[in-house]
Every structure is written in C-alpha cells, then in structure tokens.
Image (spheres, grey):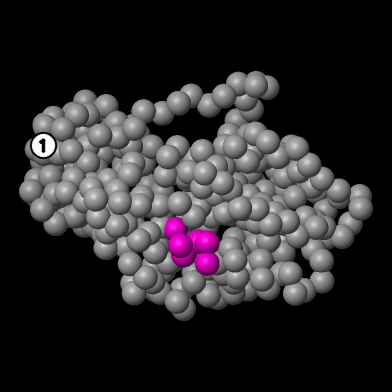
Amino acid sequence: MKNVIGILPGSRPEWAGQSVVVGAHYDHLGEGWPDVHQGDKGKVHPGADDNASGVAILLELARVLAKEKPPERTVIFVAFSGEEAGRRGSKRFVAHSKNFPPEKMMGMVNLDTVGRLGQNKLLVFGTGSAEEWIHLFNGVGFVTGVPIQSAQKDLGTSDQVSFADAGVPAVQLNSGPNLDYHRPSDTADKIDQAGLIKVASVLKEAVAYLTTRPGPLTSLLPQRRAGEPPAPAPGRKVSLGTIPDFGDQGKGILLEGIIPGSPADQAGLQKGDRIVRIGAVPITNLRDFSEFLKTLHPGDRISILFLRDGKEQTAEATVKER
C-alpha cells in the first residue's frame, strides 16, 4: 500500500515546517474485503461515494491552488491507502512526517464520503478538537451559502482520527448516510456533481483560513503522554441495520433510516426513532452505540429501548452477521 502525497510549499520563511493537511482515502473494499456485508463477498465494490468523491475534490483543490499564488503556509495533499484496513496509511503518514511534523501541523481536513450531498447539510465531524473550528465553519457556510452542520464529537472511524491521536486538530467533511455505504451499489451514477462543487467551495475557504491564520488553533484534544499509542479497537462482527443521523447531537442515536429486511426493520424500528438503551447499557452517542455493537456476535438477541414521538417503547432484535 502506498500513500500519494503532493506538497504545495508555503511562501513565508518564518513558517517553515508548518503545514495544513488535506486528506482523502483512495482505497475501498475491492471485491469485499475487509468490511464485506453478508452475501456481497466476491462482488466489485466501486466505492464512488466512499471515497472516490473525496479524492476528486482533493485533486480539484490541488489543481486550483497550484495555479494561484503560493500559499503562506504549506499545504500537503495526501491520498491515503489502507483507511478501510485500520487507517494504516494515515497512521504511517503521521508517524513518519519528519519535514512537516504533527506538532507543526495547523490542522487537518479529511474528505470522506462527500458525494451524496443533495439538499442535505454538509456534516463536519470533530469540531470539538479545537475552539475555532465551529466558528470557522459557521463563517464558511455564510460565505459559500452551503448549509453546514457541525458535530463536536468525532465518529472515530476515518483518517482524521490518526491526526487527532497525534494532537493535531482535525475534522472530517461528510455528506451524510445512505443505503449504499460499503455495498456494491455505491456507483458513480449516484454521485451529486453539484454537491461536490459545494463541498469543494467549503474546503477551499477552510484551507485559505488555515494557511493564513497567524497562530495555531486552540486545541481541545486530550493530552496523551509522549509515545503512548491509542488503545486498539476491536472490529464489529454484526449488523443491526440502522442508519444513524450522524449530525444529531442529542442524547441517544437518532435514526435517519432503516435498511429494508434488516434486524432493525424486522423489529419495527423506524426513521425518527431515538435509541437510548440496549439491554442494561445506556446509549448516549454514536461511539457508545458502535462500541456496544462490537461486543455482540451473530445471533445475539437484544432489547432496544427507544423514543418515538417522545414516548418510550421497546423492541427485540436478533443481530445478524455483518
């Protein structure tokens, strides 16, 4: 596996070694590895939204900026490999970026699954990693006219996490969930080209701010002792079939949709339901939900407490192999 890196050198000598990183992973699942759904193994997974869409915007921004006057601070464009296999490419980049070390990185913006925007708000995950992110994207939304929804908490699943783990304020742009995620049906004909232009305009404004800001962002990331690696996370073996509203910041998991025929569908869950507990385990956010699912095995039966129209209801579901 190889990362593909392009560097647009900064023009200010006093900012030598400082950088802004724009990233997008170019790997996907091939014929269904490693995150294949049951029944899809051996089928080609095109990965148009996840993540050819992000790579397309990365390349376009690099093309446009290369024609303009040099940025004041260096911009590093990285197409990562190995994101689908535990973020191997971005972890490698952070660990071996000697000329532009993490402690001199102003910030990182990751493009992952940005091709199905439509009339939705553009989601920005991880704005809680620095004080300025939410204000930056509020301003960018006003300037570009693109509706933006900031989410302070990060989903913890894409390449920006590798940078946050190294102390670099980092965010992910995302156009929202859809039923084709990690399936052979993630094809190019479903990409919203006008939406790509909107995302690209947001990215360009954000990078312009980061390359000219006099001082570093005010990091809100927890401090990790030098040399201390993040704890490894187990993989998930099961599927419930829920599509969360990734931009929702309320307690619990607000459902944006349900995969037809899934355990969640069979249990009677609907769009608009809010999962607040599974068994005896409170579910307060997406991370709680994901971590709980990682403890389950195919065939396990779970009791789900959820809110529908403000009233508590319960449903029983048997999770299946992912």
Query: Could you tell me which residue is drawn at 34 percent across and 74 percent down?
Result: 189
Q: Mark 1 points at which residue?
A: 318
Do we see residue 249 in this rendering? yes
Number of numbered tags placed on the structure image: 1
Residue 190, located in which quarter of the rendered image? Answer: bottom left
Q: Nearer the viewer, residue 59 or 17?
A: 59
The residue shown at (30%, 34%) is: 236
Q: Residue at the right extreme?
A: 13
Q: Is residue 234 magenta?
A: no
* 55 in the magenta segment: yes
Would you place residue 36 above or below residue 10 in this image? above
Q: Which amino acid does label 1 sit on?
A: Thr
Q: Position of residue 88 (x, y in %)?
A: 51, 38
Residue 295 drawn at (x, y percent): 27, 27
Q: In this view, does 27 lie to the left or right of 105?
A: left
Q: Residue at x 45, y 37 (%)?
A: 86
Looking at the rendering, which quadrant does residue 283 occupy?
Answer: top left
Where residue 252 sits: x, y (%)?
31, 42
Q: What stretch is highlighted in magenta?
A: 51-56
Q: Residue furthest bottom?
A: 194
Give the left or right position of residue 31, taking residue 25 as reference: left
User: In the image shown, does 7 or 320 lie closer to the viewer?
Assistant: 7
- The crowd level at tag 1 (other Cα within 10 Å; few <14, some 14-19, many 20+) is some
Quarter in which the C terminus is drawn: top left
Q: Residue at x 82, y 53 (%)?
A: 214
Q: Is residue 255 visible?
A: no
